């Protein structure tokens, strides 16, 4: 308040005149722009909102697809890796076990393989899905906030992901994970930008094409479902008419027998 009053002092203004157009009460911007997409945080918020069509935005769709793809890949990778040693472990653990028959032993072995595949595959898939979700979310939000695609966005996303995944092992492991993630994120970012530069497309075009593909897939599925329902409905109606005719014939026959 003291500094502001000194700046507005008539004595200072008389010593250092700023011209007749000077007005200290006038705001810096004559027109206050409303909050819209050109502000960083609004672009980030709009990622997690439905668009005008009532569907997910292309950025959120990309995050979901990357997360699901990472989870499925991790589940398959973890399940296959766990299933390699299942047969050897089953034989070594059941050397003294008496099975009813050869088929009974195979059935127990199959159950062990399926159980290990689901348990360890789900664990690996969950970790990889969480890793992909954090990385893609941070990278996408950073790119939306800055309004551009850059290598440092990928480095930031990978470093935060590495930090969070190694933080339970201590500060040293967290810093190592952060540094290693930053290096790998930089390599991934440079590779992605080089591919985009060579192909002559932008990331927005890639996301838009992915969105259009998903929309066309959903429309095709809905169309097939409607066609199937219409076909089944006509068949059900025909069956109903046949049953109704048969009941009428039976009633007519019963009336004729009684007469």
Image (spheres, rainbow, N blue to C red):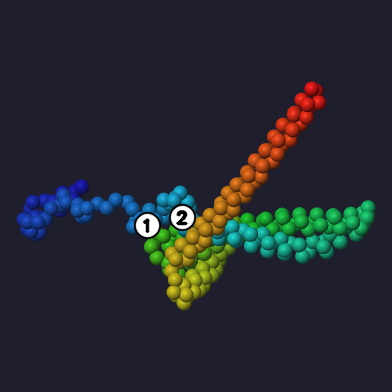
Residue placed at 78% from the left, 58% from the top? 113
**At 80% across and 54% down in the image, what residue appears?**
111
* Depth order, front residue of 96/171: 96
Kindly tell me whether residue 143 is visible in this rendering.
yes
Question: How many tags in the picture?
Answer: 2
Query: Which numbered marker is on residue 40?
Result: 1
Write down the residue under mark 2: 57
Residue 94 position, x and y percent, is 88, 57
x 32%, y 51%: residue = 35
Residue 202 position within the rendered picture, expressed as x and y whole percent measured from the top left: 43, 69
Q: Is residue 38 left or right of residue 176?
A: left
| Quadrant showing the C terminus | top right
Question: Can residue 139 be seen at all in this image of the molecule?
Answer: no
Q: Position of residue 52 (x, y in %)?
A: 41, 51
For residue 202, side relative to residue 109 (left or right): left
The quarter of the picture where residue 253 lies is top right
Q: Nearer the viewer, residue 45 or 210?
A: 210
Spot occupied by residue 223 in the image (x, y as percentages of width and height): 56, 53
Asked which secondary structure carries label 2, the reply is: loop
């Amino acid at each position: 308040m003291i500094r502001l009053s000194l700046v507005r002092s008539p004595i200072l203004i008389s010593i250092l005149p700023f011209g007749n157009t000077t007005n200290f009460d006038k705001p810096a911007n004559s027109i206050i722009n409303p909050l819209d997409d050109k502000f960083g945080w609004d672009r980030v918020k709009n990622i997690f909102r439905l668009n005008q069509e009532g569907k997910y935005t292309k950025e959120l769709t990309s995050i979901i697809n990357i997360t699901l793809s990472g989870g499925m890949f991790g589940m398959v990778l973890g399940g296959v890796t766990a299933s390699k040693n299942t047969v050897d472990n089953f034989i070594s653990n059941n050397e003294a076990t008496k099975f009813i028959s050869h088929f009974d032993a195979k059935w127990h072995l199959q159950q062990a393989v399926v159980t290990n595949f689901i348990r360890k595959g789900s664990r690996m898939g969950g970790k990889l899905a969480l890793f992909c979700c954090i990385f893609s979310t941070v990278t996408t939000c950073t790119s939306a906030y800055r309004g551009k695609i850059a290598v440092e966005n990928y480095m930031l996303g990978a470093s935060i992901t590495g930090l969070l995944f190694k933080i339970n092992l201590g500060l040293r492991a967290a810093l190592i994970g952060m540094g290693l993630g930053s290096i790998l994120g930089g390599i991934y970012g440079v590779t992605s930008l080089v591919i985009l530069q060579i192909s002559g497309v932008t990331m927005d075009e890639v996301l838009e094409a992915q969105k259009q593909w998903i929309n066309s897939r959903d429309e095709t599925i809905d169309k097939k479902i409607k066609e199937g329902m219409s076909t089944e409905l006509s068949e059900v109606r025909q069956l109903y008419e046949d049953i109704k005719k048969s009941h009428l014939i039976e009633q007519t026959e019963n009336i004729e027998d009684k007469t």
